Structure formats: C-alpha cells, structure tokens
Image (cartoon, rainbow, N blue to C red):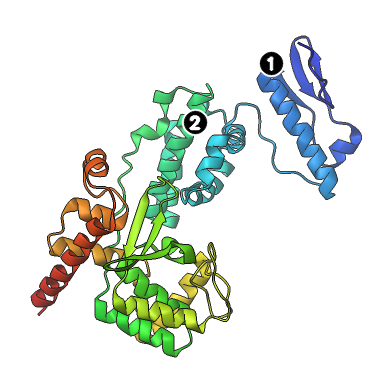
C-alpha cells in the first residue's frame, strides 16, 4: 500500500519524527519524536500538521498544549476526537468532564499513566476535598476512573491497576429540600406580577410534570398534546430515546395559555416554549437567574432551587403509596429496580403516568395532615 507523505515529519531508522520549519517553530511548534513508525505515530503526525494548518488559517501565534506521546493528556485529547466522545458530548454528562479535567491536567497531563502513584491520587483528592468540597471530590474520582478505563482501552495502562481504587469514593449526601404546592403557587403569582411570565408558566408546568429544569426549558410547541382526559407533554429522553409524558392540570393549562398569549411571537413545531422577558429561549444561566430573582422576592434568604420541584412531586407520590412502576413512568427514570420488566409490561402511557398523579394527591393530603 502506498502511503502519503505527511508534511513536516520524517521516518528515520524505523521511527517517525516531527520536524517543524523555522516558521512553525515561531508559531509554537517544537521538534518531537513520535515513536515507532506505525498507525499511531502517523495519526499523531497528521494531528500536528492539521494543528499547524488551523493555526495558520486563524493567524494565531500560539497553540494548545501538545502532550507527550502516550501521556494522560495525549490520551484525553485522542479520546475527544473519537465518536464515543462525541456521543457523550451530546448528553448532560459532558459538563462533568471539562471542569474535572482542568483539575487533573496541571498535575497529570504530561504523565505516563503507568507511573501514577497512589500517593499522588490521594493528595489530589484531599486538595479538591478541602478547596471544593465533597461533591467535586466525588466527581473527580468518577471522572478519573472513567478516563482510566479509556486509557486501558488504548493499551496505555492495565485496567485493574487504577491507583484511585485505594480511595473509597462515597457519594455525598443528596439534596433533601422540597417545595409545598402553596409555595409554588406564590412564586408563580409573584413572577406573573413582576413580568416574569415565562417563569410563572414554567414552574407551574414543572410542578405538574415533574420534569427537570433542563427538560422543561427545552419543551417545544409540537410536544404539547392531549387525549380524552386532558393535556400533556409527550417528549423523549436524549439518553434513552424513550417516551416521557408530563401530564398537566387544568390550572397549569390556563397559566400556560395565558403566557403564550403574552408572547410577541407565534410558536411553531420545534420552537422552544419558555422564554425570558426579552423573548429569547431560556438557557441554564438565564433560567436560574430569573427563578432566583423571583424566589428572593417571595422567600428572602431561601436557598431552595428550581430542581427541588421534581423531588417534591416524588415525595408526594411516595407518601401516597404510588406504585414504583407508575412513579418511574412519571419521572422518566428507573426508580423501580427491575427496569427491564417494567418497560416490557408497563410502557409509559398517559394512563400509567396518571396513576402517579393520583398518588401525589393522596400524598399531599397525608403530608398536610402530619404537619404540626
């Protein structure tokens, strides 16, 4: 097979080298040994050549850091160019990788994974625990272990030799905060009076559907539908592609319709429903900012969040002795232990979801009765 020459690289005595010209050196490139001639060395040579073309096109005079061959940073960069990474990046789990890599990279970016010592991992874990808290320390070890498995798949280390195994990575205690229905009603009313019509409608819909904040702000006009018993949103999980239904009460339908009447634009098909006061679709930041603004007007000093609405509905349903399968269908996740059987025999239909709605009503009554 004829191989195409790769610019600025040469093979000498069975090993490939990257040999930048003075022009490339002025842009930050350095001569490098790429290892024994083969697919891996050629791929690295092509990457360096493509980096030079990109730098020349953009007019930059400096480059992103170039890691040593077979180092942890080199493996991470290689992983980010794979289809597997692109698939991960389409999910919300992407957000967990980049912040943790910014912590890992300064210490381990240039390091061969086979040389990482237990003490180094323990020290980094202790530093993150002290500076950032239990949540980030737990996340750090999770990302490290996932990256280690990737590096093992690249034959850079042994899968079972991960030095982080010495750390007992206990998950931090989750949030327990909940909202009462009357509190959500007060927030919705105040939001409406203050001109935050999108927030008023969103919290009302969130309370009924038990959708997460990210799922709520991504709801589109075409996902709103109805059957003989009322209206609901019919959407799907990006991770699983399974149908998830969010039922609406008559009150939330009225609020939603009133909000849509306030919009200065007509929504069609894939248009996002919930928007801020300037008419732009909510982002994670703008949604959080607007919700906190209204919450602080109604409950000064309160630290509860929009995502706590989802937990509040689950607490009501459990108190009302909801069947685990119906609650799982309601929330679009696998609260029930036997997920395979549930999905086989109890598909997520509107009737199944409404079983959880009825349990929430019973639970709400029980919760109110137990308050002193």
Please indicate whether residue 69 sits to the left or right of residue 220 in the image.
right
What residue do we see at 30% from left, 45% from top? 170
Position of 197 relative to 339 (above/below): below
Image position, residue 367 (x, y; %): 13, 72
Crowdedness of circle 1 by 10 Å Cα count: few (<14), some, many (20+)? few
Indicate the quadrant containing the C terminus: top left, top right, bottom left or bottom right.
bottom left
Position of 100 relative to 49 (above/below): below
CA distance separating discs 2 and 1: 21 Å
Image position, residue 99 (x, y; %): 52, 51
Indicate the quadrant containing the N terminus: top left, top right, bottom left or bottom right.
top right
Nearer to us in this view, 370 or 261? 261
What residue do we see at 34% from left, 38% from top? 167
Looking at marks 2 and 1 on the same chain, the residue that comes earlier in the sequence is marked by 1
Image position, residue 46 (x, y; %): 75, 29
Nearer to us in this view, 67 or 356? 356
Nearer to us in this view, 205 or 8? 205
Crowdedness of circle 2 by 10 Å Cα count: few (<14), some, many (20+)? some
Element marked by disc 1: loop
Residue behind mark 1: 38
Residue 225 appears in view: yes
Residue extending furthest toward the front: 228
Position of 90 relative to 67 (above/below): below
Residue extending furthest toward the right: 22
What residue do we see at 47% from left, 51% from top? 92
What residue do we see at 46% from left, 89% from top? 194
Position of 108 relative to 355 (above/below): above
Element marked by disc 2: helix
Tag of residue 160: none
Give the number of marks.
Answer: 2
Tag of residue 150: 2
Nearer to us in this view, 237 or 44? 237
Image position, residue 246 (x, y; %): 33, 63
């Amino acid at each position: 097979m004829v191989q195409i020459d790769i610019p600025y690289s040469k093979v000498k005595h069975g090993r490939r080298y990257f040999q930048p010209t003075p022009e490339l050196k002025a842009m930050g490139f350095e001569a490098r040994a790429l290892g024994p001639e083969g697919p891996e060395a050629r791929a690295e040579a092509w990457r360096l050549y493509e980096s030079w073309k990109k730098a020349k096109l953009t007019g930059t005079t400096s480059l992103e850091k170039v890691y040593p061959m077979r180092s942890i940073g080199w493996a991470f960069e290689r992983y980010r160019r794979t289809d597997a990474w692109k698939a991960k990046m389409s999910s919300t789990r992407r957000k967990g990788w980049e912040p943790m890599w910014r912590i890992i990279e300064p210490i381990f970016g240039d390091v061969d994974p086979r040389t990482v010592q237990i003490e180094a991992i323990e020290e980094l874990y202790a530093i993150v625990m002290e500076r950032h808290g239990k949540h980030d320390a737990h996340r750090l070890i999770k990302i490290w272990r996932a990256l280690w498995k990737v590096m093992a798949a690249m034959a850079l280390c042994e899968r079972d030799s991960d030095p982080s195994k010495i750390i007992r990575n206990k998950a931090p205690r989750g949030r327990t905060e909940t909202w009462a229905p009357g509190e959500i009603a007060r927030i919705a009313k105040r939001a409406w009076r203050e001109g935050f019509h999108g927030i008023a409608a969103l919290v009302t819909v969130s309370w009924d559907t038990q959708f997460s904040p990210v799922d709520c702000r991504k709801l589109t006009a075409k996902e709103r539908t109805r059957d003989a018993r009322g209206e609901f949103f019919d959407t799907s999980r990006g991770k699983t592609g399974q149908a998830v239904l969010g039922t609406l009460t008559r009150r939330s339908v009225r609020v939603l319709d009133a909000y849509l009447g306030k919009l200065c634009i007509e929504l069609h098909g894939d248009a996002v429903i919930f928007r801020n006061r300037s008419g732009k679709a909510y982002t994670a930041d703008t949604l959080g900012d607007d919700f906190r603004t209204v919450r602080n007007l109604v409950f000064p000093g309160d630290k509860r969040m929009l995502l706590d609405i989802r937990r509040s509905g689950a607490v009501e349903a459990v108190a009302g002795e909801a069947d685990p399968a119906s609650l799982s269908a309601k929330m679009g996740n696998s609260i029930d232990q036997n997920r395979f059987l549930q999905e086989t025999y109890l598909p997520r239909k509107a009737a199944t979801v409404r079983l959880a709605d009825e349990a929430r009503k019973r639970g709400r009554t029980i919760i109110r009765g137990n308050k002193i």
